[in-house]
Every structure is written in structure tokens, then in C-alpha cells.
Amino acid sequence: MKLATWNINSLNVRLPQVLEWLAANPVDVLALQELKLTDDKFPAQAFTEAGYQAQWFGQKTYNGVALLSKTPAADVVRNIPGFADEQSRVLCATIEGIRVIGAYFPNGQEPGSDKFAYKMRWLDALRDWVRAEMAAHPQLVLMGDYNITFDDADVWDPDGLRETIHCTTEERTQLQALIALGLHDAHRLFEHPPKTFSWWDYRMLGFQKNRGLRIDHILVSDALKARASACTIDRAPRKNKQPSDHAPVVLTLD
DNA sequence: ATGCCTCAGCTCCTGAGA
């Protein structure tokens, strides 16, 4: 079984690439972030024809998430229960016995800003909810665009970007608090070359120079860690003519 | 210090992303 996450930066623009990628990588579950479209514009028919069921939670202009799956999704939850939020960032469902949470974490823009404070509040609420979900569902995966690096190994220029957005101590402490719930960074369960990233800036030839960050993560519970056999980042779509700035991350389970 | 690209929208500039 394979599960994947991909921030596609506009489904309107990237639908053909998503379909092309699914044809070449027929994963069982794909979590999408940054749909940037309203629910009435979601291309459900195209995914059905590709063999995927879809759950979606859209929003005009910004955010928006979806869960594509080959088999039905049950007990669907939108956003974090009990956390009032006008932004569409979380979609959760049980698929093939696995509690799957797809999330687009807030960017935070700049430490000290209102958006950064929102990011911290959102992370607090997410953690409390995920703790409860884990208690009810031993097989759980939390995947998406976290907009946080774990450590310097996830950053192309750790010194130049020290304590900047995605790299602050506050954000990394929040990420470790999720780990402390009993989750594991699937990427780090396996060996990877140094400077393996999931996002590259569109500017300054970021991808060509591998000036990137690893901010797209798949976190798994103990029960899923025991089943994990690979976790890879697929750089191929970043080489497309009109790419997303993010690459898909793929988890393989036995 | 800023823009570099890309996308959406109160669209031919601006805000936001990361």
C-alpha cells in the first residue's frame, strides 16, 4: 500500500499533472494541498475516471485540501474539531483501516507576525486533536505541507536561514511536540542523500541549484512505523514545464 | 533591503506564498 502527499499550488493549473502523476504512480491514497479553488470547481469527475474517489474541502484563492483514494473514505472530518477556522486546511478520513489526516499547515509568513501567532494556535489545536485521534486509531498517518523543517539537515542554507520562517525554534518545538505524541518522521526511518528536499523556491533557479527545504512530511504512528518499508520524495514533477514548487512524498507500507 | 517566480483576483497591479 502506498500513501502520498503533494502540495500542487492550484489544482486548476495542475490537474493534468496530478492525473499524469497518478497514472505513473498509482498510489492508494493521495493527499493534496493548496487546491486554491471552491468546492463547486473541484474536478471530481476527472478523478473518478482515473479510478479515484475524492473528498475535498476547498476555499477561494487560498488553501484547500483533498484526499484521493482508490477505496472509500469513511468518517470524514473537515478542519480541526473545536478550533474555529475560516481557512480550509485539514481533511481526515479512515481509508483501508488507516486514519489518514491530510493537512496544509499555516505558512506563518514571519516570526512575530499575526500569521505566525495563528500558526502557533493552529499547531496547538492540531496536537490536541491528533492525540485524541491516535487514541482511537492506532494506525494513523499525518501528512501534508507542514511548512516547518525538523532541523538543519532539512535546510539548504541553515546559517543564512537561521530562525527565519519554517526554521524557527518555536516551529521546530511544535513539530517535536507532534513527534512526542508517538509519531515518527517516515522520511528519517530510511537513508537519504544529504540535502534531500521537498520544496524549492521558484526564484533564483532554486530547483536547479537544489536550494530547497524539506517541509512536506509524513508522520506515522507506531503501528504504521512497523509496516513502513520506504519513504521517497519524487523530484520528477518538479522538472515539468509548469511545476508546483513542491514535490510529492510517498510512503510505502507492507 | 528588495526582487527574484507563480497564482488568483476587486486582474495589467497587488498580496501571498515559502
Image (cartoon, rainbow, N blue to C red):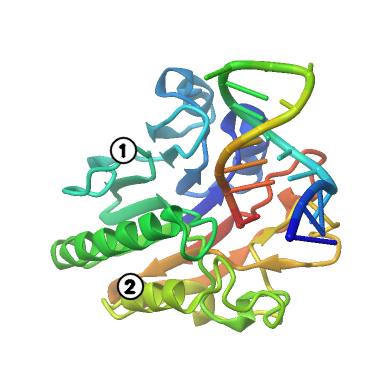
Specify whether A50 is left or right of A96. Answer: right
A202 w.r.t. A136: above or below:
above
A12 w.r.t. A246: above or below:
above
Mark sitting on residue A72: 1
Q: Which residue is mark 2?
A: A178
Q: Nearer the viewer, residue A138 or A183?
A: A183
Amino acid type at image mark 2: Leu
Residue at position x 57%, y 59% from top? A249
Residue at position x 67%, y 80% from top? A158
Provide the secondary structure element on which disc 1 rests.
loop
| Sequence order check, earlier mark of 2 and 1 | 1
| Distance from Cα at disc 2 to Cα at disc 1 | 27 Å
Look at the image and tell me in which quarter the C terminus of chain A lies. Answer: bottom left
Residue at position x 56%, y 64% from top? A215
Residue at position x 27%, y 55% from top? A99
Amino acid type at image mark 1: Pro
Q: Chain of mark 2?
A: A
Is residue A53 visible in the rendered structure shown here? yes
Expressed as whole percent of the image width and height from the top left, the position of residue A11 reads 58, 32
Query: Dot 1, crowdedness within 10 Å: few (<14), some or many (≥20)?
Result: some
Expressed as whole percent of the image width and height from the top left, the position of residue A156 reads 72, 74
Q: Are marks 2 and 1 on the same chain?
A: yes
Look at the image and tell me in which quarter the N terminus of chain A lies. Answer: bottom left
Q: Nearer the viewer, residue A188 or B5?
A: B5
Expressed as whole percent of the image width and height from the top left, the position of residue A126 reads 28, 59
Q: Chain of mark 1?
A: A
Is residue A105 visible in the rendered structure shown here? no
